[in-house]
Image: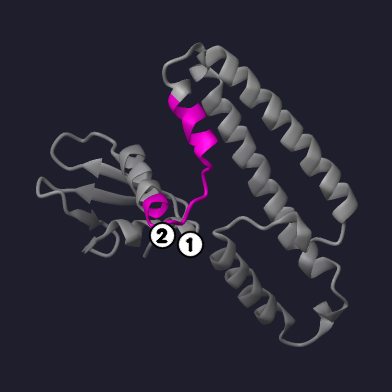
Amino acid sequence: MANASQPLLIKRYASRRLYNTETSDYVTLEDIATFIRDGREVQIIDLKSGDDLTRQYLLQIIAEHESRGESVLPVDVLTDLVRSYTSQSMSVVPQFLAQSFDMLRDRQSKIMGDIGSTNPLAKMPGFEAMQAQQKAFMKAFTGGIIPSALTDEPAAKDNDLSEIKAELEALQKKLSKLGK
């Protein structure tokens, strides 16, 4: 029985094949991306050396999606990331990115919670199943990112978004100056 609270352990063999230890079968990068989209944490280790290869494979998954035209990262952000590896700002970037994505996940959770709590149809039989399907569709359609336009509080959220954009722009300017 799979323990969803533990990361899914994937072992990479010398042949570079990836082995799912829970289901005892080989998996592809796309399978791993699906596990992650479904909410599972994964850990990929090299069977021979024991090295953790998770970061390397996650970057490979992102690169494949970006190369297929499924662009999430704007070129200027990618450029700033490359610059951050060669500048003093490198220590700030990981923390900033982690906090930004934490904030995005928290906001997404709140939005999804608000969808069910403010809807008068919530008392209708079968609404929970319909809502679950709606959430799954939105997660698949948006890649897990729900735009603020779907909420009932556009003015407050627009202000929050404006503040976040302004902070991000200021940080990007600082990063650019540090890279020069």
Q: Nearer the viewer, residue 90 or 176?
A: 176
Magenta region, residue range:
65-82
Residue 159 sits in quarter: top right
- Quick check: marks 2 and 1 in contact, CB under 8 Å? yes
Q: Which mark is residue 16?
A: none
Quarter holding residue 162: top right
Q: Position of residue 118 (x, y in %)?
A: 86, 68
Task: Please indicate whether residue 54 sits to the left or right of residue 51 in the image.
Answer: right
- Label 2 amino acid? Phe
- Report whether 54 appears left or right of 158: left
Colouring convention used in this rendered image of the protein: one colour
Relative height, residue 141 to residue 60 (above, below): below
Determine which residue is flagged by label 1.
38
For the N terminus, the image quarter is bottom left
| The magenta stretch spans residue 63 | no
Q: Nearer the viewer, residue 163 or 102?
A: 163
Residue at the spot 59% in from the left edge and 14% down from the top edge: 177
Neighbor class of circle 1 (other Cα within 10 Å; few <14, some 14-19, many 20+) is few
Check if residue 76 falls in the magenta segment.
Answer: yes
**Residue visible at 77% across and 43% down in the picture:** 161
Main SS of the magenta part reads helix
On screen, 133 above or below 42? Answer: below
Q: Which residue is mark 2?
A: 35
> What residue sits 49% from the left and 19% below the top?
90
Q: Position of residue 119 (x, y in %)?
A: 84, 73
Q: Residue at x 43, y 56 (%)?
A: 69
Closer-to-camera residue (92/116)? 92
State the SS at label 1: loop
Disc 2/disc 1 C-alpha distance (Å) = 5 Å
Which amino acid is tagged 1? Asp
In this image, 49 relative to 85: left or right? left
